[in-house]
Image (cartoon, rainbow, N blue to C red):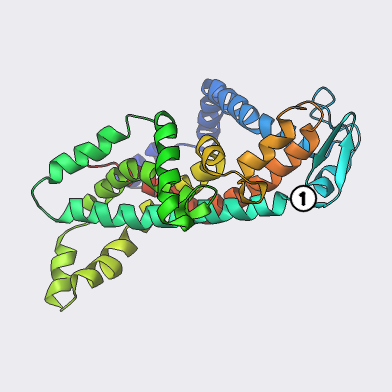
């Protein structure tokens, strides 16, 4: 055996040494596994509790537990039934859940789609073009986000009320008006996030497309947007979930039960008789989580890449 072969053999660790290193590595990092396990339990506990309450025959809050005492589907039937159900001393109407669900999908889907489109157009302009007021416009978008939409509830109500006198389709108790209000509060951060992602796309690609005869619209739709798919997916997901969960603005704009979104409609179950309507409320929440979970599963491959790349530059 040559000297080089002997040195290579000595350099390779044996199987026993590798196993010993693996065991010592787990022994040194056991606390990390414990922390991860605790985090998983904390994250899944609310979900498990809601699932149990949705299938529990006892509608009272005090009777809810992680293990249902009586499995039943009555809570789901009460959501889709047209009859009036009586629980204890309280009677409630459950005929509008499908309307609430459809309204929420329209509002959340429309807001997510328009947010992605408008934010992409604004971010592309801030990223690729140089014009007077560019820096001030970006700072203005950022400063506006310092004030939560909740502070402008009265102003939003009055604006929508007066606008409805001229254009009824965007007045009070209309879904388009609610979508427009949500768009106004979602532009700032999303534009900054997209602008940072567009900055990472080489401008030489735009120039190459123009040399080949592409128009500015073709450059935007055919070159830049496909490369920005990760950040578009992330913003669409964030906008969809945040809009689906929003309650305050929707409760101000919408007035009739047929126009309610899911948060506003489900709030009726626990408005006055909180502890007695917990079962139908949990069932409604569980069904409402399905679209968000499906969208998350569909877009999950873009999430990590989009969040890490979208804020590289500002």
Image: 88 above or below 229: above
At x 22% / y 37%, what residue is drawn? 140
Q: Is residue 121 visible?
A: yes
Compared across the picture, whether 314 is left or right of 35 comes to left
Residue at far bottom of view? 213
Q: Is residue 232 visible?
A: no
Question: Residue 310: where, in percent of width, then height?
Answer: 31, 46
Question: Residue 207: where, in percent of width, then height?
Answer: 13, 67
Image: 20 above or below 104: above
Q: Nearer the viewer, residue 184 or 311?
A: 184
Quadrant in which the C terminus appears? top left
Q: Nearer the viewer, residue 31 or 302?
A: 302
Which residue has dot 1 on it? 95
Q: Quadrant of residue 226?
A: bottom left
Asked which secondary structure carries label 1, the reply is: loop
Q: Nearer the viewer, residue 293 or 245?
A: 245
Q: Quadrant of residue 54?
A: top right
Number of other residues with Cα within 10 Å of mark 1, as a class: few under 14, some 14 to 19, many 20 or more: some
Question: Residue 276: where, in percent of width, then height?
Answer: 82, 29
At x 50% / y 29%, what residue is drawn? 21
Image: 105 above or below 162: below
């Amino acid at each position: 055996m040559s000297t080089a072969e002997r040195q290579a053999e000595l350099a390779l660790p044996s199987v026993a040494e590798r196993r010993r290193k693996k065991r010592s590595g787990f022994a040194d990092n056991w606390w990390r596994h414990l922390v991860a396990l605790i985090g998983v339990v904390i994250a899944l506990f609310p979900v498990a509790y809601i699932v149990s309450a949705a299938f529990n025959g006892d509608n009272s809050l005090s009777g809810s537990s992680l293990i249902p005492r009586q499995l039943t589907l009555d809570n789901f039937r009460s959501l889709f039934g047209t009859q009036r159900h009586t629980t204890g001393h309280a009677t409630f109407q459950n005929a509008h859940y499908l309307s609430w669900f459809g309204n929420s999908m329209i509002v959340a889907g429309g807001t997510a789609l328009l947010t992605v489109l408008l934010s992409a157009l604004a971010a592309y302009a801030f990223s690729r073009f140089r014009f007077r007021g560019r820096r001030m416009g970006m700072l203005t978008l950022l400063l506006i986000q310092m004030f939560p939409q909740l502070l402008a509830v009265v102003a939003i109500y009055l604006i929508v009320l007066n606008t409805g006198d001229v254009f009824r389709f965007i007045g009070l108790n209309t879904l388009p008006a609610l979508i427009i209000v949500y768009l106004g509060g979602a532009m700032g951060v999303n534009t900054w996030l997209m602008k940072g992602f567009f900055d990472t796309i080489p401008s030489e690609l735009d120039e190459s497309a123009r040399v080949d005869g592409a128009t500015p619209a073709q450059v935007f739709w055919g070159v830049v947007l496909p490369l920005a798919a990760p950040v578009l997916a992330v913003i669409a997901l964030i906008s969809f979930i945040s809009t689906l969960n929003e309650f305050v603005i929707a409760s101000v704009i919408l007035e009739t039960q047929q126009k309610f979104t899911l948060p506003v409609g489900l709030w009726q179950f626990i408005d006055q008789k909180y502890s007695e309507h917990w079962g139908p409320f949990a069932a409604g929440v569980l069904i409402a989580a399905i679209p968000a979970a499906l969208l998350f599963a569909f877009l999950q491959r873009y999430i990590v890449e989009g969040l890490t790349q979208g804020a590289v530059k500002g």
